[in-house]
Image: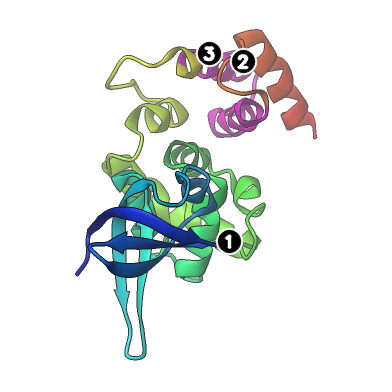
Amino acid sequence: MIARLTGKLDSMGEDWVVLDVGGVGYLVFCPVRTLRNMPPVGGSVSLHIETHVREDRIHLYGFEATAERAWFTLLQTVQGVGAKVAIAILSLYGGDELTQIVAAGDKTALTRVSGVGPKVAGRITAELKDKVAKMNLGPVAFAAAAGGGATAAPAPAQTAAGDAVSALVNLGYGRAEAFGAVAAAARSLGAEATVEALITAGLKELAA
């Protein structure tokens, strides 16, 4: 099985790249988020690979980080989520965002992905919550969402989000719904958003 490829970018399309590795061109399917970070043609590329072998084909899926590859595998343990849907989810959300979404049970965020309906979104959040909590896929974010203590010092943006969640909880909202609202606000406002801005935007999300 191929686990990693490093070579030169030969060409790329809407959801794929061809890597020239020692004169051999490998067709690799990638999330849009990975494709956005590709260098110009001829540049050096290194991707973590997930190999799918079928009777009639071999498909390679490439990711910038091992966490993304882990999410790709994990998502496909859910009924109704195949490689195509998993790639679509990872095209819209990064690993940290998915950790927040699953921890908060934010099904609405998942239904924004093409091919993910309410039933599949519900299965993803319900079936993966315990698995994500046990895996190294974003422990600080998950602990904050679940109401536990973080195991490492949070970054400033995480501190602001945590304070905003606490403020909404103090206003009477449930922790899960408060975290979901703040996570949505953070995605909209960006990493530099203040606590006050996150609270205001979070309240709007909850009122919607």
Numbered circles on residues, count: 3
Q: Nearer the viewer, mark 3 or mark 2?
A: 2
Read off the residue under disc 3.
Answer: 160
- Taking the spot 63% from the left edge, 55% from the top edge, the residue there is 113
Asked whether the viewer can see residue 73, the reply is yes
Label 2 residue SS: loop
Q: Amino acid type of disc 1? A: Glu
Q: Which residues are magenta?
A: 159-188
Label 1 residue SS: loop
Read off the residue under disc 2.
Answer: 193
Type of secondary structure dominating the magenta stretch: helix
| Residue found at the far right of this picture | 208
Query: Decide: marks 3, 2 in contact (CB < 8 A)?
Result: yes
Q: How far from the left and from the top, in percent, is residue 207?
A: 79, 30
Q: Is residue 160 magenta?
A: yes
Task: Pick the residue in front: 25 or 78.
Answer: 25
